[in-house]
Image: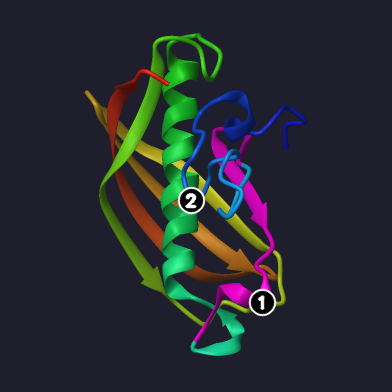
Amino acid sequence: MSAAKPFQDLGSVAHCHGCGPDNERGLRIKSNWDGEEAVCNWRPQPHHCGGSKDIVNGGIIATLIDCHSLNLAIAHAYKSEGRPIGSSPKIGYVTGSLNVSYHRPTPIAETLQLRAKIVKVEGRKAWINCTLSAAGRVCATGEVLGIRVERQR
């Protein structure tokens, strides 16, 4: 895995609940390149529980998959254009669709790993597949359609 700064710290996003480094109450995920994929390791806290104290809330899981996938789309777009992440004009992606499949309860006591890869890019659309694993077991998978938007900040 790359020792470079995470996409979010390079200016891919700022205030998002899931991935914005400027959102003090957000999840503050950090995504990095691992070959052509993006990887993120994130540790849930007790207040991220859902249904019982020992599993992660499904909405948190969906947010993790969504934000990690869109950050990969942003990083991929900058890379494809040969520009550093965060350079002007700013590139952003918003969620066109999000489909999450929950395969097993996600344990709250484990560090979660997200792995995402670009499946296809066509015009302003990027399709991304993502897995969320705990202790080496896939707990959820997601398919994300990101729509590219130009951002002022």
Residue at mark 1 = 46
- Work out whether residue 88 or residue 7 is closer to the camera in this orientation and state it: 88
Marks 1 and 2 sit apart, C-alpha to C-alpha, by: 17 Å
Answer above or below: position of 99 versus 75.
below
Q: Position of residue 64 (x, y in %)?
A: 50, 56
Answer above or below: position of 126 versus 98.
above
The type of residue carrying mark 1 is Pro
Q: Which mark is residue 150?
A: none
Q: Residue furthest right?
A: 3
The residue depicted at 44 percent of the width and 45 percent of the height is 69
The type of residue carrying mark 2 is His
Q: Left or right: where does residue 112 sit relative to residue 64? A: right
Q: Position of residue 141 (x, y in %)?
A: 43, 63
Residue extent of the magenta highlight: 31-50
Answer above or below: position of 93 versus 133.
above
Mark 1, residues whose alpha carbon is within 10 Å: few (<14), some, or many (≥20)?
A: few
Q: Secondary structure at mark 1?
A: helix
Q: Earlier in the sequence, mark 1 or mark 2?
A: 2
Q: Position of residue 41 (x, y in %)?
A: 67, 53
Q: Left or right: where does residue 118 sit relative to residue 34? A: left
* Res 114 quadrant in image: bottom right
Q: Secondary structure at mark 2?
A: loop
Residue 131 visible to the viewer = yes
Quadrant containing the N terminus is top right
Residue at mark 2 = 17
Asked if the residues shown at circle 1 and circle 2 are in contact, with their CB atoms under 8 angstroms apart, the answer is no
Residue 35 visible to the viewer = no
* Res 77 quadrant in image: top left
Quadrant containing the C terminus is top left
Q: Residue furthest bottom?
A: 52
Q: Is residue 92 magenta?
A: no
